[in-house]
Image: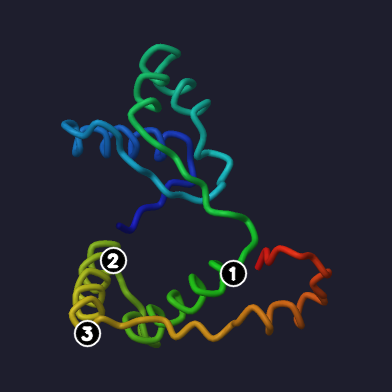
Amino acid sequence: MIVSCIFVHHFARFIKSLSEKYNGAEKIVLVMDNLSTHKEKHLVDFYGEKDGKKLWSKFEVHYTPKHGSWLNQAEIAIGMYLRQCLGDGRIETYQNLKAQTKAWNKRANQKKIKINWRFTKSKARKSLGYAPTEHPEKLI
């Protein structure tokens, strides 16, 4: 899903639209970044205490970490999207962007394109200067 939720009112309306779309769900699992507008407080500010809290309670929210190996995978995926879908051209409208993205995503899923993750524990230890200590139990 492509959305732009950088303002509180965008976020609040988007969350409400998700809630309405999946009205029958017991809980809606939401994975999102740590943008300052992506918080319960902003739903309360926009919809009021009662309605904002009730809306937020429908979601099980997981924030992506600010740092971590998942970022490299996300950056690789974004690079693939940029090269394979957007290319060098300019996309004139948001509707065209959505249509091209949907078509690209469908092709990628049909081809079962995967990221070839080659960053191993030993490479991570070397890169981060980590030397495991001697412990009788193996932690990693």
Instruction: Specify which label sits upstream in the sequence, 3 or 1.
Output: 1
Instruction: Specify which label sits upstream in the sequence, 2 or 3.
Output: 2
Q: Quadrant of the C terminus?
A: bottom right
- For the point 29% across and 62% down, the residue is 94
Image quadrant where residue 96 sits: bottom left
Q: Is residue 23 above or below residue 96?
A: above
Q: Picture coordinates of residue 108 (x, y %)?
A: 25, 79
| 10 Å crowding of disc 1: few (<14), some (14-19), many (20+) | few
Name the foreground residue: 27 vs 35: 27
> Residue 69 — which label?
1
Residue linked to disc 3: 111
What kind of residue is marked 1?
Ser
Residue linked to disc 2: 93
What kind of residue is marked 2?
Thr
> Residue 34 — which label?
none
Image quadrant where residue 68 sits: bottom right
Q: Is residue 35 above or below residue 116?
A: above
